Amino acid sequence: MTLKNPLDMHLHLRDEKMLDLVAPFSAKDFKAGVIMPNLITPITDINSLKAYKQRIIKACENEDFTPLMTLFFKKYDEKFLENAKDEIFAIKLYPAGITTNSDNGISSFDIQNLKPTLNAMSELNIPLLIHGETNDFVMDREANFAKIYEKLAQNFPNLKIVMEHITTKVLCDLLKDYENLYATITLHHLMITLDDVIGGKMDPHLFCKPIAKRYEDKDALCELAFSGYEKAMFGSDSAPHPLHTKECCGCAAGVFSAPVILPVLAELFEKNSNEKNLQKFISDNACEIYDFKFEKEKIINLEKQEWQVPQKYGDIVPFMAEKSLKFKTKLI
């Protein structure tokens, strides 16, 4: 199986030693990645963004990989955004306190309050990426956010709005209702439900936000991905946490999938779809949505070669740890 210019449209690389450990996994297999800004100190200014980008490039040296940088949403004025436009790919909005390092996120979705920034983003063609969850009952948080997505889509029809790492049938259906709504889907949400997380013994390494949902939700996600639906893009939401923050009380949310993404996707699409639709999901749809053009193509070949996923990479337990996979990636 051969893939051209794989893109990860939602990626956490962390910083410092963690960055140096995890970034090469994504850089090896992907042409570019959309980098999340929710560091311990969120990225909200251009100097910090440029410095972080350079740290990523250094960690990924000798790889053909482009970090697509994002700012943490706050009320930016039009002048700031005009000056920032050439340095940023998008702006990422987090509801306050809803996930890792999001305490400085948005506490109110009053349209009038958000209007100056979102109007400026619309005019400058800067996409808005959203972690869409309310503070309601955990299984309903994402479905209940649908009303906010609708309100934003209706009030800002020229704004490109991406519903990040969707996990519910409600949002799968909503995606088809508004021209300016798009979505990213993770690898792990194509494979697991809440049963896998807490149905037997609790598996902290599958605990993430949004939490995995019901079987009918997973089926709806699989239908979008396996059909190559043009408004759905792959975004790993690969989110590494050290072992001591996962296997503990107050477990951190996040699944570290970067080392296994393409081999596992190859198996899934071989079983449930085809190579053409995997190419759409992993690259072509995003290229069409964002009008990406690459001077140099990155071609990844997936060969039939069985291997076992390590139990740990450094101090991080990966998705599919100790499982045998039948595809292995090789750069052409």
Image: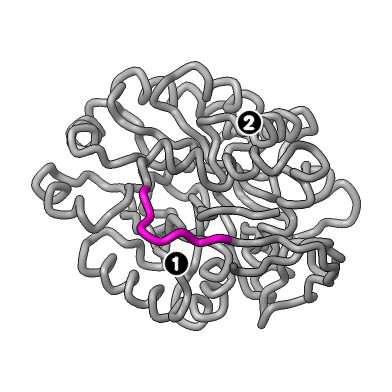
**Nearest to viewer (mark 1 / mark 2):** 1
**Residue at 52% from the left image edge and 72% from the top image edge:** 23
Q: Main secondary structure of the magenta part?
A: loop
Is residue 126 placed above or below 150 in the rendered structure?
Answer: below
For badge 2, the amino acid type reads Asp
The single residue placed furthest to the right in the displayed view is: 200
The stretch of residues the image draws in magenta is 293-299
Q: Position of residue 25 (x, y in %)?
A: 59, 71
Q: How many numbered marks, from 0 up?
A: 2
Q: CA distance from mark 1 to mark 2?
A: 37 Å
Q: Position of residue 192 (x, y in %)?
A: 77, 45
Tell me the quadrant of the picture where the N terminus can be found. bottom right
Q: Is residue 133 left or right of residue 102?
A: right
Q: Secondary structure at mark 1?
A: loop
From this view, report whether residue 132 is shown above or below residue 49: above
Say which residue appears at 45% left-offset and 74% top-offset. 15
Kindly state the secondary structure of the residue where label 2 is placed: loop
| Callout 2 crowding tier (Cα within 10 Å): few <14, some 14–19, many ≥20 | some
The x and y percentages for residue 123 are 18, 33
Question: Is residue 80 shown above or below 284?
Answer: below
Q: Earlier in the sequence, mark 1 or mark 2?
A: 1
Q: Vertically, is 123 above or below 186?
A: above
Judged left or right of residue 328, residue 149 is left
* In the image, farthest residue toward the left: 79
Q: Quadrant of the C terminus?
A: bottom right
Q: Is residue 57 left or right of residue 263?
A: left
- The percent coordinates of residue 133 (x first, y second) are 52, 37
Residue at 20%, 50% in the rendered image: 85
Q: What amino acid type should be assigned to the residue bearing mark 1?
A: Phe
Q: Which residue is rendered at x = 74% and y = 43% of the image?
A: 269
Residue annotated with mark 1: 65
Pointer 2: what residue? 140
